[in-house]
Image: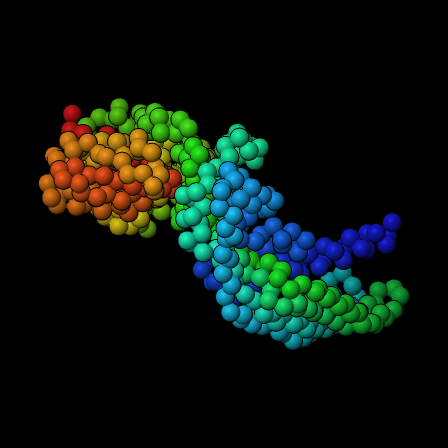
């Protein structure tokens, strides 16, 4: 039994060493954090380009990143077979060598006298590790992904898709991987030297040197790290999103009809506010629209308040937030959850927009064209988002906008992933399934601002 236990400990130690090596690798290759380390040498083959992965939620506040885990499913597995047997072009980059070797020795000596007549501990530890590895980057060609989107639909009756839809779970496509271009050995050695001299009633001395060595052989072509893109599914169409937080089934069957009712339900309390309160809330929301740092500050405050209303008091040094925060709690500091909810819902939508979109949103409020934009975006969201098919927009939705107002509106919508083209007096548009998610956030923001800017 002890032999099996020791073997198990060795495997665990080797796994930790591999994960530590891949984490160090991604820090050197991509300090911005979008490159994800492979945590298991055994599972590395499931993190190649075009494999699908799921995301585990963060469990602790100290976790800075989500963890992704294998599904064993490739993108081609969930697509309807195509007539073209064309192989996907996975492009390899040139090899680069990443090295990290260190030699460290530390010594310590201290005395204990409170509970012992005489006690002295001295010791030294040294560590030597070598991590030098030659890697290549493998990436799926954009043309191949476009080809797949055009030629092959999603198998909506596939068991994997059914399970995802039932759980409302997001899934991601690996579009890039970093792999070892040659067999590599990772070597780590530890040496500890110690001398413990302790005198209580009996004088004894223990001296010794202890060492350990670990070696991991990484095979050629082993995947060490990967990048992902969210997979967006709408009916049988699919797309790859460039926004990391987009949801897989936002545009699922019933999603278009469900969005409007969901927004109306979440923002219902805003429509019941008095004219005076609507003006105060609008002032604060406008302040966060033009200041992304302030937006994050307010969102964090309200998230904490919503999670634990009894232990959170809403305060801010920014005067633009004062009226809003004061009216989200009573005179004793108790939080009004029924008001915090819709405000937080609005802030989450604003947080999904780009800074350029937020700028144009602020301009839209100033020019009092939010209600017109809301109807336009609502009309676009009813369309079929497929890059191959253009949709037409009602000319009445655009004719009431002046040229400058139209430019602001067009830019704000196109930043959400929908391309608008003038076609005589009206417009046609195109957008992929991923654009539905981005445009949905804009719809929520416009709806909330429409309620707050009403004068009746």
Quadrant of the rendered structure where residue 402 is?
top left
| Residue 397, image x, y percentages | 17, 33
| Residue 376, image x, y percentages | 22, 34
Frontmost residue, 125 versus 344: 344
Quadrant of the rendered structure where residue 335 is?
top left
Left or right of 269: which side holds 33? Answer: right
Frontmost residue, 434 versus 108: 434
User: Residue at 79% across / 66% down in the picture?
Assistant: 117
Frontmost residue, 202 versus 179: 179
User: Residue at 66% across / 56% down in the picture?
Assistant: 41
Left or right of 73: which side holds 93? Answer: left
Question: Relative to 280, is 23 above or below?
Answer: below
| Residue 137, image x, y percentages | 52, 63
User: Residue at 87% across / 69% down in the picture?
Assistant: 204
Quadrant of the rendered structure where residue 393 is?
top left
User: Residue at 87% across / 64% down in the picture?
Assistant: 201
Q: How is the image coloured?
A: rainbow
Left or right of 216: which side holds 59? Answer: left
Task: Specify the quadrant that holds the C terminus.
Answer: top left
Question: Outermost residue toward the front?
Answer: 83
């Amino acid at each position: 039994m002890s032999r099996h236990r020791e073997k198990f400990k060795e495997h665990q130690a080797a796994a930790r060493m591999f994960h530590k090596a891949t984490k160090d690798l991604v820090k050197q290759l991509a300090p911005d954090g979008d490159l994800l380390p492979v945590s298991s040498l055994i599972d590395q083959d499931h993190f190649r380009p075009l494999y699908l992965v799921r995301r585990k939620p963060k469990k602790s506040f100290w976790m800075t990143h989500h963890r992704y885990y294998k599904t064993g499913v490739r993108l081609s597995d969930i697509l309807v077979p195509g007539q073209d047997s064309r192989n996907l072009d996975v492009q390899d980059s040139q090899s680069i060598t990443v090295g990290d070797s260190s030699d460290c020795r530390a010594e310590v000596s201290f005395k204990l006298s409170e509970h012992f007549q005489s006690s002295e501990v001295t010791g030294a530890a040294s560590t030597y590790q070598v991590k030098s590895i030659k890697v290549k980057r493998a990436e799926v060609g954009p043309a191949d992904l476009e080809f797949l989107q055009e030629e092959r639909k999603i198998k909506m009756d596939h068991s994997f898709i059914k399970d995802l839809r039932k759980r409302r779970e997001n899934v991601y496509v690996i579009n890039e991987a970093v792999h070892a271009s040659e067999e590599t050995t990772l070597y780590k050695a530890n040496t500890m030297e110690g001398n413990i001299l302790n005198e209580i009633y009996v004088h004894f001395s223990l001296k010794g040197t202890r060492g350990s060595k670990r070696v991991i052989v990484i095979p050629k072509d082993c995947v060490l790290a990967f990048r992902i893109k969210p997979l967006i599914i709408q009916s049988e169409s699919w797309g790859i999103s460039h926004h990391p937080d987009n949801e897989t089934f936002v545009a699922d069957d019933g999603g278009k009809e469900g969005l409007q009712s969901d927004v109306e339900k979440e923002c219902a309390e805003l429509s019941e506010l008095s004219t005076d309160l609507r003006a105060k809330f609008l002032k604060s929301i406008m302040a966060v629209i033009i200041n992304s740092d302030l937006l994050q500050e307010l969102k964090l405050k309200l998230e904490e308040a919503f999670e634990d209303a009894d232990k959170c008091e809403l305060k801010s040094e920014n005067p633009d937030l004062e009226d809003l925060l004061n009216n989200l709690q009573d005179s004793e500091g108790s939080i009004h959850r029924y008001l915090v909810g819709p405000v937080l819902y609005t802030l989450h939508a604003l947080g999904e927009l780009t800074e350029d979109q937020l700028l144009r949103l602020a301009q839209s409020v100033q020019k009092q064209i939010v209600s017109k934009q809301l109807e336009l975006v609502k009309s676009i969201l009813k369309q079929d988002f497929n890059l191959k098919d253009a949709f037409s927009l009602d000319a009445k939705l655009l004719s009431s906008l002046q040229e400058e107002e139209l430019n602001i509106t067009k830019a704000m919508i196109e930043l959400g992933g929908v391309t608008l083209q003038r076609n005589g007096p009206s417009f046609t548009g195109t957008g992929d399934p991923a654009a539905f998610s981005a445009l949905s956030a804009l719809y929520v923001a416009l709806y909330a601002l429409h309620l707050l800017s009403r004068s009746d």
